[in-house]
Image (cartoon, rainbow, N blue to C red):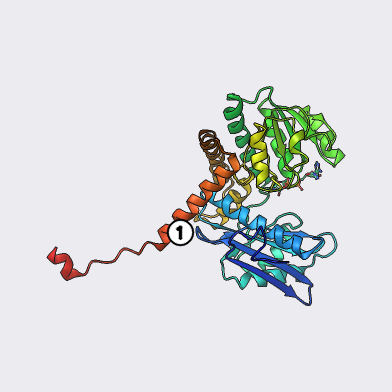
Amino acid sequence: MDVFSSPAFDQHEQVNFFYHRDSGLKAIIALHDTTLGPALGGCRMWPYASEADAITDVLRLSKGMTFKAAMADLPYGGGKTVIIGDPRTDKSAALFRALGRAIDTLGGRYYTGEDVGTGPTDMDWAHEETPYVLGSTRGGGSGDPSPVTARGVWLGIRAAVAHKLQRSDLAGVRVAIQGLGHVGYNLARLLAQDGARLIVADIDQARVERAADELAAKVVDVDAVLSTACEVLAPCALGGVLNDDTIPQLGCQIVAGAANNQLLEDRHGAALHARGILYAPDYVINAGGLINIALELQPGGYDRGRALAQVAAIGTTLAEVFERAAGAGLPTHEVADRIARERIAAGRQRQSRPALQAVPRRAAAAS
Ligand code: NAI
């Protein structure tokens, strides 16, 4: 259970372990990089099979948040919390209050929010103990981020289709969506309005039936969606979906969806590139949720109209990634990582530059 030598460590600034005896809280809060500003990243609650799995997950997610914020041009860094526990049975007000106190000890270097396994009520409990919580229902909260995330993914799909297929619209373009949850269903609606032909799969039968009725989507089995012939595959369910088993089976020309950590490992980005499949790096295309929540910290506070307007930049950023990757003959995930690191390095340089010195009066007069 190494941390410093974990392959996912990637120069994290700070990794904190919190335990609270009375509530049973076991949480890990990882702060990857705060060069561009305080770290932002949600709180995931999951019954991890082992502590090593929880550590790997928090480190990978936290690093992803740093890159996500940098690519969305936000003045924030990346962090993440994982709580080891079952969200169906282990939640309590005391547990999330203890989490709030833990976050408070970080003194504003990290803000949390909801993620898989947590929701607004949990954030309200944490907020009772610390101001460093976003997405709480109390006072100017930003609410459900999914429609904003979906809009960013839709714009990203348009940018990918323009680059790969030289098409400026989606009429007749086949898009296979894996997962019709909060983001996936909103995305399906936007794509249907654009004339795309939808192919959908979800383990929840009611969701696919609704998409078939409302959006004329073609339903395929969850095991068949990755190999379905289509122009675009939009993973909107699970992480790690692009791996040694799935990549040879893919029936698409483009992968562009909302799920976090779609590449099981970085090398799978190169495998997609080798197959000629254009990959929209997940942390670029799914930044809408972060853009949405970050507005709570901006002067003037949260405004949904501003969130939707800021999300428009996702399409432009992805087009830049695609062009740079094509020019250099590199996989898109490598180019996105490179741009994110450049932005962070530029931020570090700005910070290390000595502040302008006031010119002493006499010297000024002499010159
Ligand atoms: P959700 O939990 O509302 O939806 C996930 C959907 O995937 C559910 O309908 C579920 O039944 C389905 N699903 C689960 N396993 C499946 C499988 N094997 N095959 C097909 N469908 C399956 O989650 P949400 O909020 O829509 O997020 C989707 C993904 O996007 C997640 O990976 C999340 O981390 C990521 N994401 C979400 C953001 C947001 O604003 N909600 C922001 C950024 C990323």
What residue do we see at 66% from left, 45% from top?
267
Question: Secondary structure beneath disc 1?
Answer: helix
**Residue farthest along the bottom direction in this orientation:** 21
Query: In the rendered image, is residue 267 in sight?
Result: yes
In the image, is residue 54 above or below residue 306?
A: below
* Along the line of sight, the residue nearer the viewer: 265 or 36: 265
> Residue 10, how many percent across, how many down?
60, 59
What residue do we see at 35% from left, 64% from top?
354
In the image, is residue 274 above or below residue 297?
A: above
Residue 195 shown left or right of residue 76 in the figure = right
> Residue 69, how many percent across, how many down?
56, 52
What residue do we see at 69% from left, 60% from top?
58
Residue 109 placement: quadrant = bottom right
The residue identified by callout 1 is 348
* Along the line of sight, the residue nearer the viewer: 91 or 142: 91
> Residue 116, how many percent across, how many down?
74, 54
On the rendered image, what quadrant is the C terminus found in?
bottom left
Residue type at mark 1: give it: Arg
